[in-house]
Amino acid sequence: MEITCSRCHQTVQPDDCFCPFCGLPQLVYSGESSGEQAQPDKWNEVVRDAGSIDWKPALRYALLLAIPAGVIAALLSSLVVLGLLIMGVTGALVVVLYMRNRHPSWITIGAGARLGLVTGLLGGWSTFAASGFALYAARSWFHQGPMLDDLLRKQILESAQQMLSLGIDPQKVALAQAVFLTPEGRAGGVVSNACFLALALLVFAIAGAALSARILARTRRPQS
């Protein structure tokens, strides 16, 4: 007979003490007159909601790992895939560090995803800030503005050629090219790219943390 959680109605295995999706304790009582609990040996630990998070230490762990990871991702802006992988691993490590130091019985995927969300937000903003600072330093302190402008202009022209090769209306391509070649357009393009990278880092941090929580849920779930 299939057993489902009374809160989220997901399938629960017979030996699960907690729902692997929402963390609700799966208490089973005997219907006999003795009134004894049918699974007395399972509950060797204090029953708590596995979906809850102690945010004070969780934020400390997220800050400890996410900010350096965000700065590294900014330095690796030319290797976007590597930066995304680093942020995914960072989200997973935050969950592992939280579990190791707080010693909960286990953690749900949803709670892990929330830890990843905080980690991704901190990492994304760190990447955005580090990229902005590096750009400001390159233009103001190292006087590399003309070189950066030439690089952006080259990228815009290459993008326009790719759009033309895809059969997009040449007039629309020319209009877009003219907009992005202006100083305002170049600045908007840089900000848009930085925002897109921060969003991608957020997604990878959530995915990494949720996967880590899923793996730890299998290994640390209370056993009978």
Image: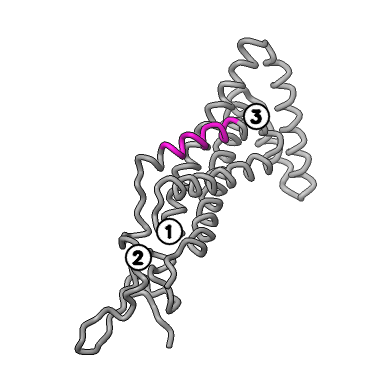
Q: Name the residue under label 2.
A: 44
Please report whichever mark, 2 or 1, sits nearer to the chain's N-terminal start.
Answer: 2
* Residue 63 magenta-highlighted: yes
The part of the chain drawn in magenta is 60-71
- Which one is in front, 221 or 118? 221
Identity of the amino acid at label 2? Asn
Query: Badge 1, how many Cα within 10 Å: few under 14, some, many 20+?
Result: many
Say which quadrant the N terminus sits in: bottom left
Question: In the rendered image of this protein, does residue 80 appear above or below residue 74?
Answer: below
Q: Which marked residue is nearer to the observer: mark 2 or mark 3?
A: 2
Tell how many labels: 3
Q: Is residue 29 left or right of residue 69?
A: left
Query: Judging from the image, what secondary structure is the residue with disc 1 in?
Result: loop
Badge number at residue 106: 1
Q: Can you say which quadrant of the picture contains the C terminus?
A: bottom left
Q: Which of 221 and 13 is in front in this view?
A: 221
* 25 relative position to 135: left or right: left
Q: In what element is the residue under mark 3?
A: helix
**Dot 3 amino acid type:** Leu
Return the x and y of residue 202 as percentages of the image width and height: 52, 44
Q: What element carries label 2?
A: loop
Q: Residue at x 47, y 61 (%)?
A: 220
Residue 112 locus on image (x, y percent): 46, 53
Structural distance between the alpha carbons of marks 2 and 3? 48 Å
Residue identified by numbered label 3: 75
